[in-house]
Amino acid sequence: MSEAIRVALVGATGLIGREVISACVGREDVRLAAVARREMPLPNGARMELFIADPGHWSEVFEALRPKVLICALGTTWKQAGEDEAAFRAVDEELVLATARAAHAQGVERMVMVSSVGADPYAKNFYLRVKGEVERELGKIGFLRLDILRPGLLRGQRGGDRRPAERIGIALSPLFNMALHGKYRRYRAIDASEVAHAALALARKPTRAKLVHEHDALRREARGLPMPAEGDA
């Protein structure tokens, strides 16, 4: 087996971040280190490092870790941001870009970024416009490989901040998914665990590229991630 790939994860306390950590349990091909602003419980069997630091010091953590890949699952919700545009941008734009630039400056070669289906810098919808603007700016930083993940509605145990409409959407997602075909397939709901597996699969790919992955591509990448006993970086 070749040497395990060193991966830094930011956004570890969120839905996809927690799933990435769980997906690494038992893996020998990925050496995961999570960088967070607060303590968090780790799943049984997790063999990883957890660094607690203010975002202003994350560059120092990257310098010490020397990861090859950054998985970024940072993000807030409109509700968590108090429905305030500046507060939303502070996390989903400013923190994401500052983290990416700090990682790149410390030699991180590749980045896997969790965005959103419909992201477009020219979208009328504020949320999707910010996501699109961030994707555009990430492409200018200079990573050798940049993988943008654009999942639809995420299914999983997010916690108590689900809106009633979102909970209903998740409950009905199997029916909605069956109704979404052709170009609309990309809007299908997807399990957060599948997105996490896709992120890890892409983190293992060393080839130069700038790619966007939507529903079908995410599921395909997730299925392509070797089982822990098979994996090698």
Image (cartoon, rainbow, N blue to C red):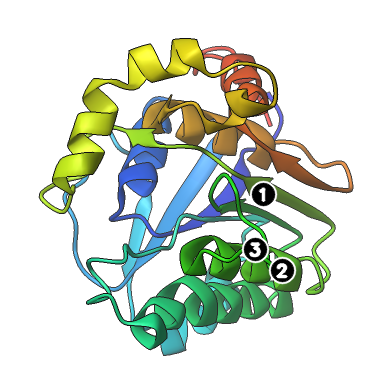
Q: Quadrant of residue 76?
A: bottom left
Is residue 43 visible in the rendered structure shown here? no
The residue closer to the viewer here, 220 or 60, is: 220
- Circle 3 is placed at which residue position? 132
Q: Is residue 182 left or right of residue 128?
A: right
Q: Which residue lies at the image location 38% right of the left edge and 43% below the top edge?
A: 16
| Residue type highlighted by circle 2 | Leu
Q: CA distance from mark 1 to mark 3?
A: 11 Å
Q: CA distance from mark 2 to mark 1?
A: 9 Å
Residue positioned 55% across, 75% down in the render: 99
Q: Where, by quadrant of the figure, is residue 153 drawn?
A: top left
Compared with 18, 178 (above or below) is above
Q: Verify CB contact (< 8 Å) between mark 2 and mark 1.
A: yes
**Quarter of the rendering occupied by the C terminus:** top right
Q: Which mark is residue 148?
A: 1
Give how far across and how far down residue 45 sits, in percent: 26, 31
Percent of width and height locating residue 96: 53, 72
Left or right of residue 24, residue 181 in this image: right
Q: Secondary structure at mark 1?
A: strand
> Relative to residue 124, is residue 217 depicted above or below?
above
Q: Residues within 10 Å of mark 2 (few under 14, many from 20)?
A: some
Mark 1 or mark 3: whose residue is earlier in sequence: 3
x, y percent for residue 231: 60, 20
Secondary structure of the residue carrying numbered label 3:
helix
Farthest residue to the left: give it: 160
